[in-house]
Image (spheres, rainbow, N blue to C red):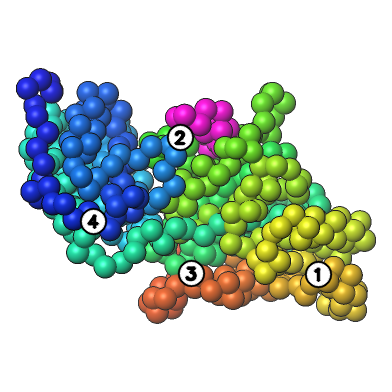
């Protein structure tokens, strides 16, 4: 497609009244386009529109429109479109592709695509579609800028206390309780590398792929680095857990988490147990920090140090929760004394259940799915409900057990069902 001779045309008459868009009075558009020529042409149309702006790296506002070019593997694109559309009320996705077969178009519609531009692109069609999009946005009274996913950081009081176990069970719990919401699990732990194993997900990409070159950070790259678990939860493993040099820069944490927040309702971060600068950045951005501890003396000592560090570093104490893992009922008095020492009541205690925990890790199936009737799984269920993240949708709530059964009937169900 050639741009020669094409002049940008103003849509909707170029009113002087600016819209109440997401960023500086304009609605943000993200171009996830691999063909340079198509991208340039689309950028031209958007630049000419007074109410639209193409997102750049420094934009922290929520993207309202994603224009996506279909991947070589369309299933990846469609799954991404579903996530992107569901994450923010009113967000739209336009698709472009040289492929125009009816199967692709049908799938695109099912995934929630609002407009489809066959290639070579007719710029007039794009202008008209963008004009209608702006009108829809302006009519929409909702304030989209508030639709930013919440960040939940899970931090270990010490190594091996069960942090990753909490992350995967809580993450799946959130997804099951509220299937229309989107959940991503991020492994910020640069000394871990267990996240994908805990979920038995083959993951070829990681946080390292993004962190190594922030200039490439956009929705397109994000699509490629996330891996999807059968529950719908997306995961981003650390990739920093080998011997090769290079660590995650603290400066890259904020843009990465912000981008994830603009796409997902819940961003659950496995912070490991080392309180380094990248972790601190994530903790600052979190709406809740869950510190995992046990009632073992050295763990309590270190948990106290961590809590003191958090409190003294300006983090709002109201967002800190403490959860004791591997708890036995005869430890009631120890628990009370420990809470006094730490100057905080525990939000939850997770029972010690070696067999269930071991089988869950060995089969790559979180306990809430592999052993939903155990006391340990019930605690995770209660956690999701108590955190106020339960679905507002009654049908979704009622379907908790049904969805669990669905997951159990999927990959390796018979093997996991016997555990409970
Ligand atoms: N409630 C529990 N009862 C018994 N065993 C448990 C429980 N929770 C976790 N475990 C076991 O503890 C071990 C460590 O769990 P996990 O890997 O989640 O800890 P972690 O804090 O993430 O470790 P790391 O510091 O290495 O990242 C696992 O083998 C798991 O099976
Ligand atoms: Mg871990």
Determine if residue 363 is in view. Answer: no
Q: Which residue is mark 2?
A: 217
- Left or right: 356 in relation to 235: right
**Tags 3 and 1 touching, CB below 8 Å:** no
Describe the element under mark 3 as helix, strand or loop.
helix
**Tags 4 and 2 touching, CB below 8 Å:** no
| Marker disc for residue 19 | 4
Query: Crowdedness of circle 1 by 10 Å Cα count: few (<14), some, many (20+)?
Result: some
Q: Name the residue rendered at 35%, 50% in the picture.
A: 23
| Marker disc for residue 327 | 1
Residue segment shown in magenta: 203-217
Instruction: Point out the tag, 2 or 3, that comes first from the N-terminus.
Output: 3
| Marker disc for residue 177 | 3
CA gap, disc 1 and disc 2: 42 Å
Q: Position of residue 101 (x, y in %)?
A: 13, 38
In the image, 248 versus 176, the foreground residue is: 248
Instruction: Point out the tag, 4 or 1, that comes first from the N-terminus.
Output: 4
| In the image, residue 214 lies in the stretch drawn in magenta | yes
CA gap, disc 4 and disc 2: 28 Å
Badge 1 residue CB within 8 Å of ligand 1: yes
Q: Name the residue rendered at 71%, 72% in the picture.
A: 348
Describe the element under mark 1 as helix, strand or loop.
strand
Instruction: Point out the tag, 3 or 1, that comes first from the N-terminus.
Output: 3
């Amino acid at each position: 497609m050639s741009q020669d001779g094409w002049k940008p045309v103003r849509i909707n008459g170029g009113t002087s009244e600016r819209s109440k868009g997401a960023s500086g009075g304009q609605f943000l558009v993200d171009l996830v386009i691999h063909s340079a020529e198509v991208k340039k042409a689309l950028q031209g149309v958007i630049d000419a529109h007074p109410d639209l702006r193409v997102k750049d790296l420094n934009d922290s506002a929520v993207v309202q429109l994603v224009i996506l070019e279909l991947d070589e593997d369309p299933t990846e694109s469609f799954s991404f479109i579903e996530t992107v559309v569901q994450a923010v009320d009113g967000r739209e996705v336009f698709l472009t592709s040289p492929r125009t077969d009816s199967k692709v178009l049908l799938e695109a519609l099912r995934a929630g695509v609002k407009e489809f531009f066959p290639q070579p692109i007719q710029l007039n069609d794009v202008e008209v579609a963008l004009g209608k999009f702006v009108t829809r946005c302006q009519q929409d009274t909702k304030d989209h800028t508030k639709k930013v996913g919440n960040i939940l950081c899970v931090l270990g009081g010490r190594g091996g206390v069960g942090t990753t176990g909490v992350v995967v069970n809580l993450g799946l719990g959130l997804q099951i309780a509220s299937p229309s919401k989107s959940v991503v699990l991020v492994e910020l732990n640069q000394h871990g590398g267990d996240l994908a194993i805990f979920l038995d997900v083959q993951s070829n990409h990681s946080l390292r792929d993004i962190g190594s070159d922030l200039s490439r950070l956009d929705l397109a790259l994000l699509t490629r680095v996330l891996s999807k678990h059968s529950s719908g939860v997306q995961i981003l493993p650390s990739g920093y857990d080998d011997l090769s040099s290079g660590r995650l820069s603290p400066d890259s944490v904020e843009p990465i988490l912000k981008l994830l927040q603009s796409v997902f309702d819940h961003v659950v971060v496995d912070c490991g147990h080392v309180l380094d600068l990248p972790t601190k950045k994530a903790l600052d951005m979190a709406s809740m920090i869950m510190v995992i501890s046990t009632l073992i003396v050295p763990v309590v000592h270190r948990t106290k140090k961590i809590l003191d560090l958090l409190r003294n570093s300006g983090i709002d104490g109201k967002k800190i929760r403490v959860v004791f893992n591997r708890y036995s009922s005869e430890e009631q008095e120890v628990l009370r004394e420990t809470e006094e020492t730490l100057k905080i009541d525990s939000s939850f205690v997770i029972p010690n259940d070696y067999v269930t925990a071991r089988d869950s890790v060995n089969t790559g199936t979180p306990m809430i799915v592999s052993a939903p009737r155990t006391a340990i799984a019930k605690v995770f269920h209660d956690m999701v409900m108590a955190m106020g993240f339960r679905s507002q949708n009654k049908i979704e709530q009622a379907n908790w057990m049904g969805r669990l059964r669905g997951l159990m009937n999927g990959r390796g169900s018979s093997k996991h069902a016997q555990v409970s």
